Amino acid sequence: MNAPVSPTTPAQTATPVTDAEARPAAAPRGNAPRERDQRPRAPKRDLNGWVLLDKPTGMTSTQAVGAVKRIFGAKKAGHAGTLDPLASGCLPIAFGEATKTVPYVMDGVKTYRFTVRFGIETDTDDSEGRAVATAEARPTDEAIADALGAFRGEIMQVPPAYSALKIDGERAYDLARDGEKVELKARPVTIHRLVLVARPDADHAVLEAECGKGTYVRAIARDLGRALGCLGHISALRRASVGPFLEEDLVPLAELDARAAEGEAALMEALDPTELALEELPALSLTPSDAHRLRCGQSAILRGRDAPIMEGHAAVFCQGALVAIGDVEGGEVFPHRVFNWGRQESPRGRSNGKPPHPRPER
């Protein structure tokens, strides 16, 4: 999505927004009582599936999960990758058995759209931090486009000092907040795509990135600013997609509230199936007897002329139903994660006119 790059205009003030993979927000000051949610709570129930939340700014990921969990009345919930309060976008929330698929989503490619504010470098590499250096120079569009090439592919990246990485058992952001000098080693990350999509003014550039696990968008902004000789930090951020979960499928929190008010059927249409998280894994189909073996913790031999020749993880189905995530080795599949559906409620699909997500051909 390469939008035309507009000519620069006089500088504008950046809207403070931070990195999706950033440190947690600072604790609120004082002991002001938190306002109690007076809305009626649905009785807790077993649910399975994914809610693809379009997280608003001003809300932590934990608060977002709690709000969605309350709307659905789900007993068990988790999310696939933290978004800071000042970042918006894709926050996949898993219910019940879908929490077993969270690691596969977090390992997927993530897409970010973010704004770099040139001329100022901060200690946090975002606009919430303290300015530590400034520069008068501003880059041209051509200079930015040329510099981006060095950030594509597998690169070595030094994570921000304000990150959740641990140093001798302590979180880096805790050490940084205490005034200690934080030195993190560079580590390999993969950036599949990084392009300039807009130039609102001389101080700002809007970029899009597709990157692998462990990539810090704040570090991209910091290092790009240094490479251009003008310094920089993140001033706005939106996560557009995570793994198989795409921006066009995101549901705002207000829509979930509206669906809940409309009724159970409307709400359940916002719940996507558990197996959607596994679309990037090869799919295996087993007979009922072999599927039963996996459910009991035993392996199953892949028989017949049509038996797949493969190794590694696979999504295992029986008669169209997800049974397990299996480890395939030597013509045999071993249970890695087994799904226990029981009488739990499962998703009924969407009513937004879109067909169900098809499994890719293997």
Image (cartoon, rainbow, N blue to C red):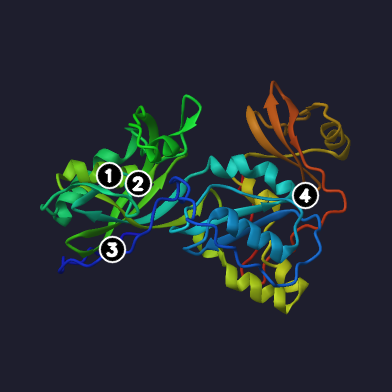
Q: Is residue 323 left or right of residue 135?
A: right
Mark toward the start of the polypeptide (4 vs 2)? 2
Q: Amino acid at mark 1?
A: Arg
SS for dot 4: loop
- Cα gap from disc 2 to disc 3, whole angstroms: 15 Å
Mark toward the start of the polypeptide (4 vs 3)? 3
Q: Is residue 262 left or right of residue 134?
A: right
Q: Circle 2: is it few (<14), some (14-19), or many (20+) Cα within 10 Å?
A: many
- Mark 4 — residue? 320
Q: Is residue 203 left or right of residue 290?
A: left
- Mark 1 — residue? 222
- Cα gap from disc 4 to disc 1, whole angstroms: 47 Å
Mark 1 touches mark 3? (CB < 8 Å): no
Residue 245 visible within the image: no
Q: Amino acid at mark 2?
A: Arg
Q: Nearer the viewer, residue 220 or 300?
A: 220
